[in-house]
Amino acid sequence: MNLFNVYPLFNINPVKAQGSFLWDDKGEQYLDFYGGHAVISIGHNHPHYQNKLKEQLEKISFYSNSVQNELQTELAEKLGKLSGYEEYNLFLCNSGAEANENALKLASFHNGKSKVLYFSGSFHGRTSAAVSVTDNSKIVAPVNFSERFIKSEWNNIEQLEETFAVHGNEISSIIIEGIQGVGGIMIPTVAFLSKIKELCEKYDVVLILDEVQSGYGRSGYFFAHQEFGVEADIITTAKGMGNGFPVGGVLISPKFQASNGLLGTTFGGNHLACAASIAVLDVMKDENLIENAQKMGEYIENEIKDLPHIKSIRRKGLMIGIELDRDCSEVRSSLLYDHHIFTGNSNDKSVLRILPALNIKKEETDLFINALKTVLEKI
């Protein structure tokens, strides 16, 4: 059997990782400034993370959600305290797409409505409803398309109000990323988010904040939307939540009522996933990683902002989009093959996406800064 080849692959085979570095099967070292799409939040193989998983493996690695699991309770308590959403409830699943699927379903159960408003440039996942609210026609199959899903322009308050004037009483939920990642590090305005919240309250619409990429300290706040003083009804998270272990979560306002069978999952909230997620929260708290994200993000921006060929820098914390005056693919390729640094791209071909671990150190950022300077000055 062969693999179903849906991924364009770099000719690099990592076999070892530690902190912010990877090593391939030839022994070459690489600086990881992308973290596998913002997944690596506390660095590769953090000792506390490793120990938590090893200890759990020696006890029990999995049983279904038909039994009690005190690790789920510990995770919910720690997540509530660190995020500031202590009064909310937690549903555990396996990925960001699954978290968004459950959020959309829960909203529809809550108000009995079926339409969903989403925004241009969005990416919410590849599963049925999640891909239907993703702004990429190439990955939306005919079976996923429905007129229930309504697109509005990002940061366009006038169009938002017009859409509600027509469909407001039919809309079940609005789903929006705290910061658009795949869309090119697009940051919502305060006025835009405030208007969304106002319209949600007026029309009994559930506000879903997709913090799958922008959450877990990535933006310099626990969740990106918290900078703007807007409280979500439902928050979805994944990626950095498990530092590489597959896990997702839905944070749910107390106004939603749970009932047996309302949501469900086989693997979600398993013992190993909880151990990994608890370890991430421990490290984030003990090592002040949210503050480090703010500090290091600011440092990187200040050091590169005057380099040639950079049109703009869109950044919150360590979620950084570097807009170039050209397609970024050549720059990204040179960083990888000439300087051994992993970076990312986005749907905006000119945007280089930077998502290092939240515990990145100054000397490691300097490796990236100096390499980027060399590459851009040669163009």
Image (cartoon, rainbow, N blue to C red):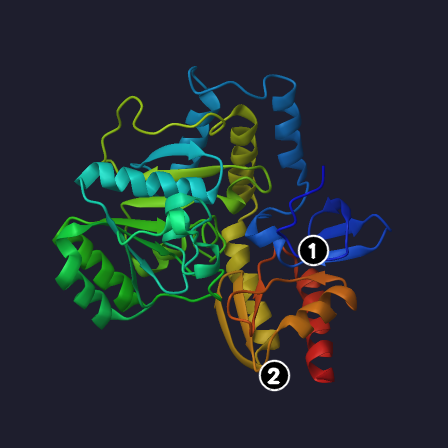
Q: Which quadrant is home to the C terminus?
A: bottom right
User: Which residue is depicted at the point 67% across and 45% down?
Assistant: 44
The residue at which mark 2 appears reads as: 309
Q: Which residue is mark 1?
A: 9
Percent across and percent down for residue 364 are 70, 61
Query: What's the mark number on residue 269?
Result: none
Quick one: label 1 or label 2, which is nearer the N terminus?
1
Examine the rendered structure and indicate whether residue 256 appears above or below residue 340. Answer: above
Q: Residue furthest front?
A: 142
What type is the residue that disc 2 sits on? His
Drawn side of residue 91 relative to residue 369, left or right: left
Of all residues, the one furthest to the right in this rendering is: 26
Query: Hey, which quadrant is residue 245 in on the image?
Result: top right
Residue in the foreground of this view, choosing between 352 and 139: 139
Residue 237 in percent (x, y) is at: 43, 44
- Residue 340: name its quadrant: bottom right
Callout 1 crowding tier (Cα within 10 Å): few <14, some 14–19, many ≥20 = few
**Secondary structure at numbered mark 2:** loop
Question: Who's the residue at 54% across and 31% down the image?
Answer: 273
Residue 218, image x and y in percent? 50, 54
Whether residue 239 is visible: yes
Q: Which residue is at 62% across, 52% downward?
A: 35
Q: Amino acid at mark 1?
A: Leu
Residue 210 shows in this picture:
no
Q: CA distance from mark 1 to mark 2?
A: 27 Å
Left or right? Give the position of 106 relative to 211: left
Q: Position of residue 310 (x, y in %)?
A: 57, 80
